[in-house]
Image (cartoon, grey):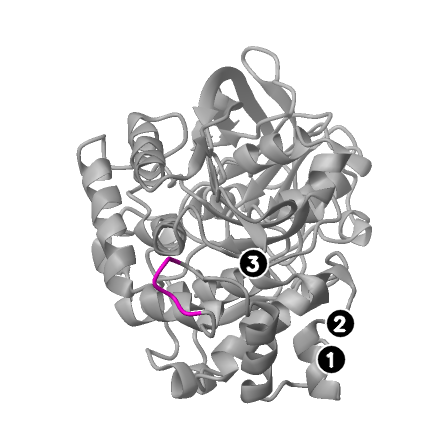
Amino acid sequence: MATWASLEPMRAITAVTALASSLVLLGSTASAATDPARDLAARVSADGAHRHLIAFQRIADTHGGNRAATTSGYSASVDYVAGRLRDAGFDVTTPEFEVKQKVDDAGRAVVGTASHALVPFGDTPNTPDGGLTAPLRAVPEDGTPGCEASDFAGQDFRGSVALIRRGTCTFVAKYANAVNAGAAAVIISNNVEGHLDLRIPGAVPGGSASRADGTALAALAGQSVTVDLRHHDEVHLDRNVVAQTRTGRADNVVMAGAHLDSVDAGPGMNDNGSGSAALLEVALKMGARPKLPNAVRFTWWGAEEAGLIGSRAYASALSFEQQLDIALYLNFDMVGSPNPGYYVYNDPGLPYGSKHIEKAFSDFYTARNLGPEGLNVRGASDYGSFTALGIPAGGIISGGGEVKTVAQAAKWGGTAGMEMDPCYHKACDNLGNINREALGRNVSAAAHVIASYAVTTEGVNGVPSRVERAALR
């Protein structure tokens, strides 16, 4: 956590008011004494965000049941968000980017007469037509299967098909260790229900198996297996939504984003209709022409679920000067979980200034006796596209597959021993999968922190803010 002293609330309010004393904040009727962060946080609501969620649910219901990248449901979601922002007077663009979609042509592992389904990894080579035949070698299932090179030392994996169970370390690490051991092909089996559809760049064919198929294959280790893994890519165009206020400094922009796409399995109301709806509520309540020192750029990303494709395309197209114009990036991905927690991103090694953002969110929740906790999100959402450029970033999340502890249930409510979002990446992630109280708290947190940085980014930029200097004095 950051080492600066906690600020007394009244001093903080006084200092921010002094900074903005000549401004009419957040609308023509606000007084010069208004604290913009408190004002905006008080005006956003769960009801406002939930209305957008209703729109996303109806879009999914009338477009095949989801809002996944490159689908008509996603396109309609883009049109809805962009239309609301244009009507409110924002400067709105919907820049296009390319999405490579993997199409599976073959996926199976055959031992004797038994055939087991596989899903080919994207970005790995295909096997020959009809498959590749080699000995099947299974990595022992210890606490970290396939995560160390030593896991492959007890058997001869040269020219074999390596079978590894999911768990602990990354898929890329398991695959790389198998290839380094000489494997001719790699299978990673799931440790929960369902199949894995992954992109792992590499030099040998690879694919995933379900938990059940992985268990069955492990029992056949040592026998000859034929793996047939073939796929090709189709390229489609998709769109992001970018909306910037028409006032404020354009060379010190506060950027806030959420991914707009769902997975194929369902409508994606928590993941990430909730973050998209919360951000749209903040934008519309802030308005297109707030009298604030810094411009705010609101963004909704496409194809996040396919590998952060929309945000990466946007970030990679920025010149260095355009990167410097962005003071910081704030991310909102899953903020209405049905069994919620209150997590703040605290990944180690984030760019300078990110700890200030972490503290800003933590202070908001602490002031409301919510006992926030840090969570290492490991770059697995769109903020990673900006931290890779050295841009300070942070965000909040109400939880996905994390299981709520007894201690967390005591301070946050909800059910101990249950996942924070039991419908994560499932068809049941619908309007019934949203906790309205958490949504309301988190949309207020988003509004408070976005508006605070729209007033000043000094703490993030390396200069103690006026509020902090006042507290020290």
| Residue extent of the magenta highlight | 27-31
Secondary structure at numbered mark 3: helix
Q: Judge by depth and name the residue closer to the eye, 430 or 116.
A: 430
Where residue 277 appears, x then y in whole percent?
34, 51
What residue is rendered at 40% in x and 41% in y? 260
Which quarter of the rendering shows the N terminus?
bottom right
Q: What residue type is labelled 1?
A: Arg
Mark toward the start of the polypeptide (2 vs 1): 2
Residue 412 quadrant: bottom left
| Residue most extreme to the front | 22
Other residues around mark 2 within 10 Å, as few (<14) / some (14–19) / many (≥20): some
Is residue 104 visible in the rendered image? The answer is no
Q: Name the residue under label 1.
A: 469
Q: What residue type is labelled 2?
A: Pro
What residue is rendered at 22% in x and 44% in y? 55
- Left/right of residue 192 with respect to residue 201 in the rendered view: left
Q: Name the residue under label 2.
A: 464
Rounded to the nearest whole Å, what is the CA distance between mark 2 and mark 3?
A: 16 Å
SS majority, magenta? loop
Mark toward the start of the polypeptide (3 vs 1): 3
Where residue 371 appears, x then y in whole percent?
50, 83
- Left/right of residue 396 with respect to residue 205 in the rendered view: left
Mark toward the start of the polypeptide (2 vs 3): 3
| Residue most extreme to the top | 129
- Left/right of residue 262 with respect to residue 313 in the rendered view: left
- Above or below — where is 376 with respect to 262? below
- Whether residue 428 is in magenta: the answer is no
Q: Name the residue under label 3.
A: 454
